[in-house]
Amino acid sequence: MKIGIVGTGYVGLPSGVGFASLGHDVVCIDMDTEKIDALKAGKITLFEDGLEELFHKSVSAGHLTFTSDMKEGVENADIVILAVGTPPHPVTKEADMKYINAAVRELALYVNGYTVIANKSTVPVGTGDAMEKIIHDVNPDADVDVISLPEFLREGFAVHDFFNPDRIIVGSDSPKAIERVKELYAPFGEKVDILFVKRRSSETIKYASNAFLAMKIHYINEMADFCEKSGADVYEVAKGMGLDTRIGSKFLNPGPGYGGSCFPKDTNAMACMARKYGVEMSLIETTILKNDARKTQMAERVLNSVKDMERPVIAVLGLAFKGGTDDCRESPAMEIVSELLKHDVDIIAYDPKAMPTAQKILGNKIRYADDAYQAVQNADVLAVLTEWRDFKSLDLEKIKLLMNRAKIVDLRNLLDKEKAVHLGFDYVGIGR
């Protein structure tokens, strides 16, 4: 099939590479000419584990191309997939639709023949209806079906999730569009089930899923606080809970709060939509407030470890919102660093992949290390803020020799607590 994908971010590019790897002919479209020029030159513009190898294979096979010309990307497409950002409005926190509406207006000019417009962006319920109106206002003769095709790719695991989806949701009541979607995913064979639902149901499923997972994270964080006071171990508690198939073990890892490009944005958007429809969603509203407050609480844990010092040196490991990605959007680590910077501290940080991204945000407000050991040299406390696997294998004996004080605040419970304590570290974790 011929596929046009509008947007080359953390959804668009992995999806484009994935569909190209399945043998479809994919054109990725982006108005950012610098990004398109880089992709054309063979330079991948974001980090996802396993993405670069597939990217080069797909390009070499001729299945993946790039353009900043909307007409070139969509005029011969069987399916046009929208993977455009819907960032939160700075005031209302609802999804900002200006980018996706602009993309729809432009592509409406160039669609040729019957085309399925598949919306993979996370958008408010009812957006499919609005998109249809825009398209037919711009081009009354356009032969299109607008469907909802929400993405469920986890950042850091996008390639794995593309090829191993636990579900594919399609919102459409058009038999013609449904057949085209089946053709799109035909290379998977019987490996995956496709659930066909109403378009508005599909648009809701994405928000409902992310809001539920955010609440689950908030719940285990509150349970971790309880365990610290009561003498229980949150990991033993989480394991016992997770054995109940009604609960499940995923998203029961305590930490500094949820972040990233999805959960904060989608919980806020869900709350905004609920208020619009006059529906009370107290669980989501409370989760948003308490998750925001948790970043400040976690920063206070770090500050408390050096409260007796003037201008302490704080070594930070991790700036991305999670391991496996260079994305720093709504990163708990970045928010904690911002809280720390409200005090008289000296911060030196290291992240395996997110340093360039973080530096664009923080500039020279902090120092940047070349590796973890350089970050901890002469530090008064080590704060672990992102769960990179690389950090698990760090040499704690070497770290102790390099540090000014043997203090660790491990907000991901990533390091070996028993070994750290045995070596003489003052170790603070979460929920234990």
Image: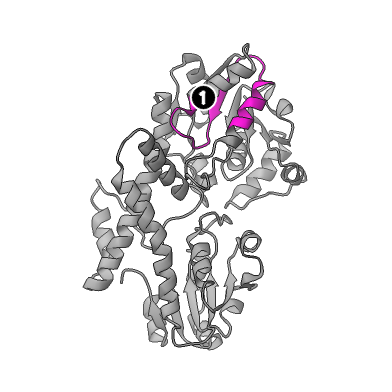
- Residue 344 forms part of the magenta stretch: no
Taking the magenta stretch, the answer to whether it contains residue 104 is yes
Q: Image quarter for residue 206? A: top left
Instruction: Report the side of 66 relative to 16 (left or right).
Output: right
Residue 412 visible within the image:
no
Total marks in image: 1
Seen as rendered, the residue at the extreme front is: 91
Describe the element under mark 1 as helix, strand or loop.
helix
Looking at the image, which is closer to me, 60 or 138? Answer: 138
Q: Amino acid at mark 1?
A: Ala
Residue 266: percent from the left, percent from the top?
Answer: 44, 44
Instruction: State which region is magenta.
Output: 101-128
Residue 99 figure quarter: top right
Residue beneath the point at 32% across and 52% down: 286
Q: Residue at x 60, y 17 (%)?
A: 137
Q: Position of residue 350 (x, y in %)?
A: 59, 70
**229 relative to 147, above or below:** below
Work out whether 11 lies above or below 320.
Answer: above
* In the image, residue 225 above or below residue 218: below
Task: From the top left corner, tell me how far across and down residue 131 is, in percent.
Answer: 54, 24
Query: Is 26 on the left or on the right of 403, as rendered?
Result: right
Residue labelled with disc 1: 130
Q: Nearer the viewer, residue 373 or 259?
A: 259
Q: Would residue 143 be visible to someone looking at this image?
A: yes
User: Which quarter shows the C terminus?
Assistant: bottom left
Return the residue found at the far top.
141
Q: Is the residue 41 above or below the residue 409 in the image?
A: above
